[in-house]
Amino acid sequence: MQLKRVDQIQLRGERVLVRVDFNVPMEKSLITDDIRIREALPTLKYILENGGSLVILSHLGRPKGKRNLEYSLAPIAKHLSSLLNKPVTMAPDCIGVEVEKLAERLPAGGILLLENLRFYEAEEEPEKDPSFAKQLANLGTVYINDAFGAAHRAHSSTTEIVRYFPKKKGMGFLMAKEVSTLSKIFQNPDRPFYALVGGAKISSKIGVLDTLLAKADALFIGGGMAFTFFKASGIEVGKSLVDTEHLETAKGVLAKAKQKKVPIYLPTDVVIADGAKVLSIENGLPPDAAGLDIGPKTIEAWKKELEKAKTVFWNGPMGMFEKPPFEQGTFAIASLIASLNAMTVIGGGDSAAAAEQLGFANRFTHISTGGGAALEFIEFGSLVALDALKM
Ligand code: ADP
Ligand code: MG
């Protein structure tokens, strides 16, 4: 079956289950960044304008399969209501008799937001209770997935639930936008195509470097990621962030790059925690030094190279940008990328936050709402939740 978009599906009179990614950052039940909610609005509004009612599904944080109101979606229901300028009913749970009643009574144009899916273990581990997906499915008559940020996960609300919608299923506008932009990078990027990777989630990102090597014309490795590579090359990095479990992976990436003749740029100088001193990396760092940002020489050298780019994919900040003065590397590189006449894509929550802080967000071609999902899409050219929609 062909992958359908929400505007290719009959919606009038239907109760539409929409899986969104409302996993927004919160502090004491205040939403600190609502971009993921705003990005889902076009799909939600379209369904309402075309005669459907909405049953919205999302996860939030990691409540680990237990009901924990610290992770309640209730504050999001309020915020969504103000964004849509319409009442949003907050369900007391995501399954159960009471929720079924609320769904059944939903009038055309009505909006019901279900409580956090991850209050149930079966959301992330569907095999623990296959009836969970079925109970969710019972709440609606059409299924739309617009949760790009969760589309690389085989969860009850993404891959299992679709079984109950053999015909009436599809993707939302946000998912479609992500897919079309990332497909271009996956299939035929304008060249030179440079990939920049940094940040702290080394174990989950190091694998994709292999794939990026197959597609990119050069790789720039900064942020916390760089130190695992130095360590793997026998250069001492003191107290800098190192993922000792992935030293071999890093060696493998370096060897493959050499064989494929794809240049890998690593920082030549770094800013360390102690007094924000700049040290050259050539002879290694002293034992108590922790590198928290790329240094000024690195920034200058990388800028010169990056200026040639026709496509840039950036994932992961170049330093600990939340803590001045260690933001300079990230900000300098972000502002350079933003100024390019090229296709520029950011994947990754913290990288996007950095661009947003600078007020540069709208100067990038695309800011992906899912870091892990964007990386997996570039790696495999598809995602499990998308495949499920095609079946
Ligand atoms: P993204 O969300 O963009 O995918 P990550 O989550 O992988 O990025 O990493 C973001 C985090 O990496 C930030 O909190 C930042 O402070 C941290 N970071 C970046 N560089 C370093 C470094 N040199 N040492 C320690 N942490 C770093
Ligand atoms: Mg992050």
Image (cartoon, rainbow, N blue to C red):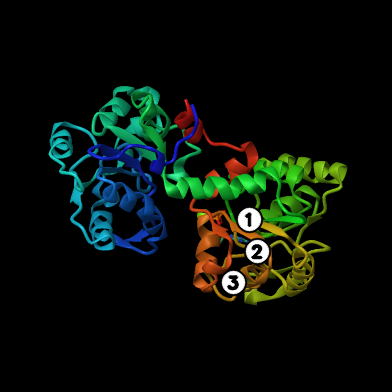
Q: Which residue is mark 2?
A: 290
Q: Which residue is mark 3?
A: 327
User: Is 127 or 1 nearer to us in this picture?
Assistant: 1
In the drawing, does residue 53 fall left or right of residue 248?
left
Q: Nearer the viewer, mark 1 or mark 3?
A: 3
Q: Is mark 2 within 8 Å of ligand 1?
A: yes
The three-letter code of the residue at mark 3 reads Glu
User: Residue 35's x, y, as percent?
Assistant: 41, 60
User: Is 365 or 353 nearer to us in this picture?
Assistant: 365
Q: Secondary structure at mark 3?
A: loop
Residue 241's disc is 1
The three-letter code of the residue at mark 2 reads Ala
Which residue is rendered at x = 85% and y = 43% of the image? 260
Gap in angstroms between the C-alphas marked 1 and 3: 17 Å
Q: Residues within 10 Å of mark 1 (few under 14, many from 20)?
A: some
User: Residue 21's x, y, as percent?
Assistant: 39, 48
For the question of whether residue 372 can be seen, the reply is: no
Which residue is rendered at x = 68% and y = 63% of the image? 342
